[in-house]
Amino acid sequence: PSPSILSFTLQLAGILASSESRFQHLQQEKLLGRLFGWEGPRGGAAWEDASVRSAWVKGVHSMVHHQPALHFLCSTGGMDVIFALQGDPSLFVASAASQLLVHMLTFSLESETSKALSTKDCDWPVCAQMIVKHIEESLQSSSASHIEQSLKLLSSLFGSCFGSCYAAWTEVLWLDIAKQIESFLLEETVQAQPVLANLLLNVARSPVFCGTEGSFWALVTSALEHLTPVQAGPLAVGLLKLCKCPQGVRIQALTVLLQPMDCILRAASQPLEYAGLLDESVSDPVTVESLLSSKTSCAGLLCQSLAHLEKLLSLKHLRVDLPCVSLLRSLMTILQFCNGFLSPSSPLGSTISRNLINCFRVQKSALDVVAALSEKKDCDTLIESLFDVLLAYLHSPNTSPTVLKKTFQATSKWLVHLQELSCSNSQWQQTEKILEDMFLVLQKRLCSPCWEVRDSSLEFLTAMVKCLRDQKEFRQCLLSSEVLRLTENLLEDPESYVRASAVTAVGHLAFITYFAPESPVTGNQYNKENTVAKLQEILSTDSEGFPRRAVISIFTTWLREGCTGQLEDREQFVSRVIQTVERDLDWEVRLGGLELVEVFCSQTICQLSQCPYAPVSSTVTSSTPRNELLQVFCRAKLFGFLFRSLCDCDKPVGQRACDVLIGLRGHFYPMSTLENPQEIEDSPAGRGIAWLQRTLRQGSLAQNFPTDGGEGVDFQDPESMMLALGAIDLLELHDELNKSSDHVEESPQSLLQDILATVGTIEDNEVDCY
C-alpha cells in the first residue's frame, strides 16, 4: 500500500489495540505482528517514509495501555526500534519516540510495581529495565548524539512525573545517574550543556527534591557556576519561580541573571561613580565581559537576560529582592549605548557601545523591562533621568517605528507613576514640564510620514487619556496643544489602521472635550454632534473593517459610561447605529452591534424597573414598566436585529444574539415557562410567530429574513415580541448554535463509514483529514 494508507492503518490498529480484548483479537488474527512486529513495515522500503515511521510510533503509543502490549513489544524487538528512532532524522519522529519511551517507563512501573523499588535490577519490570539500561549505556557512550538523546529523554521523564506516586522510582533513577550528570558539567568536551540545564530544572520541580538540603542542590549550584551565562539563564529563571528552593540557590540564580547588567553598569561608570549591581559573581566575570565584547554574542546575551528579568518582574511573589534602582540605571545605560548618547571612557564600555549601536532587539527588550519597573516604588530617584532618556528616544529620527512603539508603551506607564508621585509629594512643576515636552513630541509624531509611527502615537495618546483624563495638569497640557486637531485630521488618514486608532483616540478624548461636567472645549470644529456624525459616517462608509470596528467599540464605551444622554437620546442613538451595523459585511462589526444592544438593554431595564438588575416579578408582568420596556426596545428596532442575527452566517454573531435574547426572556419570563402553543396559534400574531419558529429551526440565513414584517411577523409590535420571547425555545437554539461543526462526524461509527467509503476509490481519498 501507499505510505498514506499504511500510516493510517498503523494508527487505526494502535487505537483498536488499546483495549486488551481487541488486542487479543488482533493477535489471534496475526495482524499485530504484520504491522508492528518483524513482519511489519520496519526495515522495508516503506520505512524510508517519515510518515510511516511516525505512524508506527503513534500506533504503539496508542496501544501501550495494558501489559500484553508491553510484553509484545519487548518480545518482538520493538524496543530496539524505538531506541533507534530517538535519533531519527525527522525531529517529529525522534520527539515522538522519546515521548513513547517516557510513557512506557511510567506505565510499566505504575502497573507492574507493587512494592518500593531499589537500585537492584531485579526489582524493576522487564520493560523498565530495558529502558533504564539503554539510558545508562547511552550516557556512558562516546557518541555525543546518544548522550544528548538520553539527556532529553530524562528531561522529558522528570518533566512529566509530577505527584507523590512518582517520587520513589524517580529518586532511585536519579541516584543511579547523578554522578554521570555531574561529570558532564565538569567535562568541557561534552556539548550537551543546554539539555543538562533543562534536565536539572525538571528534576528540581519533581517532588523528590522539594526539600532544601541534599546533594542535588549542590549539583545545581555547580551547574550555575560551570554553565555559560547563556546556558545558565533558563535554569536560573526557572529556579527563581520555584516555591521550594534553598535561599542560597535563589540568590545565586538571580546573580547569574544580573551579571550582564552589572557588567554594563561597571563598564559605563567613571571610577567609583556608581556601585555595580553585584557584590560578587557566580561565574568568572571575564566570561561575561568577553561575551559582551563580541559583536555576535553581545545582543543575544543581553536579550536573553532582559527577557528573563521581565518574566521575574511579572511574578506576584518573588522570593528574592531585586536591586531595582541599580537595574534601572543599567537599563538606561543600555538604551544610551544603543542610540549613541553615551560615550564611555573605559575600553570595555567603548567596545560594548559599538556593539549595541542601533541594535533594535536590545532596545525593545530593555524598554520592556523599563515598563515593568514602573510598578516598583524604589526607582523614584531616577525618574527625571529616565524621562530624559525616553524623550531622547521619542525625539530621535533614528528611532525605528517598532522601538518607538515600545518607547511609547514604557513612557505611558511611567507617566501614570509620575502622576501618582506628584499627587503624593506635590512635584507639579516637574510633572507639568515632562507633560509639555511629551505633547510637543506627540504633535511631531502625529505628522510623521510613516504610518506605523502615526499609529503608535495615537495608541500612546489613547493610553494616556484612559489613565490621566481626570488629572487637571494633563487636561491643561492636552488642550493647550495641537493634539486634538491633529488627531481629528487623522480620521481621514489613507491607512486604515491609523483611521481605526484615530477613531479610538477621538472616542476617548471625548471624555475630556465633550462629556466632562464642565467641558472646556467650544467651537464648531470640536462640536460633539459633528464628531458623532463623523464617526457614524465612518461606520457606514469606510471601506475597511478596522475603522468600523473601532467606531462600534467606541459607541459601546460611550453608552456604557452613560455619555449618550437621556433615554430618548440613547434610544435614537442605538436605533441609528444598529440599522447601519446590521448591513455591515464584517461579522466583528455586527458582533459589536450586539454588544451595544446588550449594554442598552441592561441600562434601560435598570432605569425603568423598580429594582435594578432584578427580573420583573410575576405580579407585575402586565404592569406599565414591562410595556414601556417593550415599547422602547421595539421603537429602537432591537428585536428585528436580534432575531435576524440568530440566523447570521457567522456563528459567533448568532451565539451572542441568542445570549441577549435569553437574557431578555429571563427578565420578562422569570419562571422560564414557555407560552402555550395552542394559545399562540389562536392569537392574531400566531401565524407570524409560528413562521419565525420554523425559520429559526431551519437555520435560514439572515438575508432570507423579511425586512418589512413579512409572513405577519411585526418586530416592532410589543405584544408580538413578548409572545415570541415566550414561544421560541431559545435554550434549544442556544445548544444548537454551540455545537461544533464536526459534532455529527466525530464518532467511531462515522470513522468506520469513512473507511468503507474509501474502498475502491483510494486515489480520490488519499488526502483525507485522517
Image (cartoon, grey):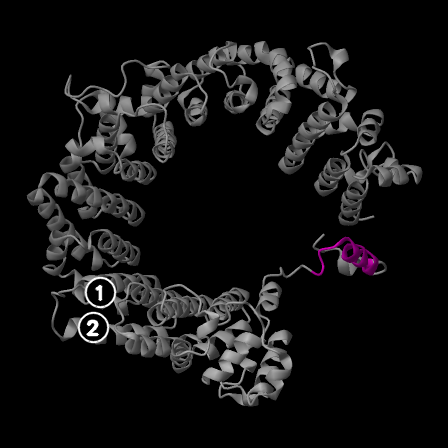
Q: In which quarter of the image is residue 175?
A: top right
Residue 452 spot, x, y in % from top left: 30, 55
Q: Is residue 392 visible?
A: no
Magenta run includes residue 754? yes
Residue 327 spot, x, y in % from top left: 26, 28
Which residue reaches farthest front? 619
In the rendered structure, the answer to whether residue 587 lies left or right of residue 398 reads: right
Residue occupying image coordinates x 43% and y 22%: 232
Q: Given the image, on which type of amino acid does mark 2 rest?
A: Lys
Q: Name the residue under label 1.
A: 510
Task: Out of 22 and 602, give the one closest to the viewer.
Answer: 602
In the depicted structure, whether residue 209 falls above or below residue 526: above
Instruction: Compute the Cα span from label 1 to label 2.
Output: 8 Å
In the depicted structure, whether residue 636 falls above or below residue 612: below
Q: Is residue 250 visible?
A: yes
Q: Name the residue under label 2.
A: 528
Task: Out of 663 and 210, give the one closest to the viewer.
Answer: 663
Residue 589 spot, x, y in % from top left: 42, 68
Residue occupying image coordinates x 75% and y 41%: 52
The kind of secondary structure the magenta stretch mainly shows is helix
The residues colored magenta run 744-758
Which residue reaches farthest left? 429
Identify the element where label 2 is drawn.
helix
Marks 1/2 in contact by CB < 8 Å: the verdict is yes
In the rendered structure, the answer to whether residue 686 lies left or right of residue 532 reads: right
Q: Quadrant of residue 734?
A: bottom right
